[in-house]
Amino acid sequence: MRIAICDDEKEIRTLLSEKIRALYPGAELFLYKSGAELLLSNIRHDILLLDIQMPGKNGMETATELRRDDKKTVIIFVTALEDYVFQAFDVNAFHYLVKPFDDAKLARVLANAVSQAASAKTEEKIPDLMITAGGKHITVNPGEIIYAEVFDRKIILHTAGENIEFYGKMKELEKKLGDNFYRPHRAYLVNFDYIRKYDASTIYFENGQALMAKQNYQDFVKSYLRHNRRKGGH
């Protein structure tokens, strides 16, 4: 679960981050001191706690710009003013917390936000891949891909039933397949759901294996643990 806090006051960012860490120790926290910094991050957050009164681009303007490309992030406005409460509906805000609020209120709002974010993730479905293989146009269900590898300028998709070869770029495939997949080595892209075991040099599946680049090992382990937490509903 990725939770972001965007507030120009360092004390508020610190306070909120401490409270969130106490409630959700497994969450990834991202802190931003301005709307511009948040928008430039290009990180997809599950939940965003957003101040409205900020220098430069205020919270409402930031949310409006964010919604152009991101309809999923659960936005919670955190502000000392009630003046913008009706505008919050325009950007599909989840809640509007007016300062000061107590810990119990924050916990309730966050619990509901986490539930909604988790539901949104469950509902998300990666569209089928449309590729050309052997002169034929075919569709491939991403959930059936165990891993992909580059061999002789082609990409090979390994599934339980067959291996599909086509010309393409691994970087583009990685973008299409999303968070369920990880690229441990420049020549491999793996589906977390099919991993049986791994070490610092190799990832093993029921049928097949993929190489692990040494410099990617620690990040892979963190990403795999995050994936397992998502699947476990944490």
Image (spheres, rainbow, N blue to C red):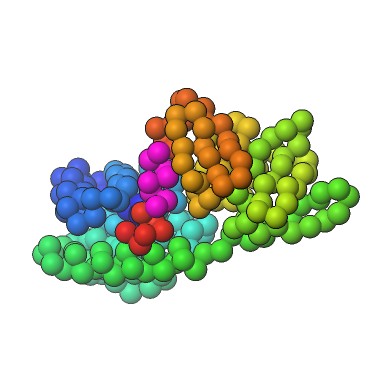
As for residue 190 lying within the magenta part, the answer is no
Residue at the farthest top position: 214
Q: In the drawing, does residue 106 fall left or right of residue 41?
A: left
Above or below residue 43? Residue 212 is above
Instruction: Give the number of callouts.
Output: 0
Q: In the drawing, does residue 168 fall left or right of residue 182?
A: right
Above or below residue 94? Residue 219 is above
The C terminus, quarter of image: bottom left
As for residue 224 lying within the magenta part, the answer is yes
Q: Residue at x 24, y 55 (%)?
A: 24
Q: Main secondary structure of the magenta part?
A: helix
Coordinates of residue 229 in the picture (x, y in percent): 36, 54
Q: Residue at x 78, y 41 (%)?
A: 167
Q: Residue at x 16, y 63 (%)?
A: 99
In this view, the residue in front, 15 or 212, is 212
Above or below residue 40? Residue 87 is below
In this view, the residue in front, 98 or 206, is 206
The N terminus, quarter of image: bottom left
Coordinates of residue 184 in the picture (x, y in percent): 52, 35
In this view, the residue in front, 162 or 183, is 162
Q: Which residues are magenta?
A: 221-228
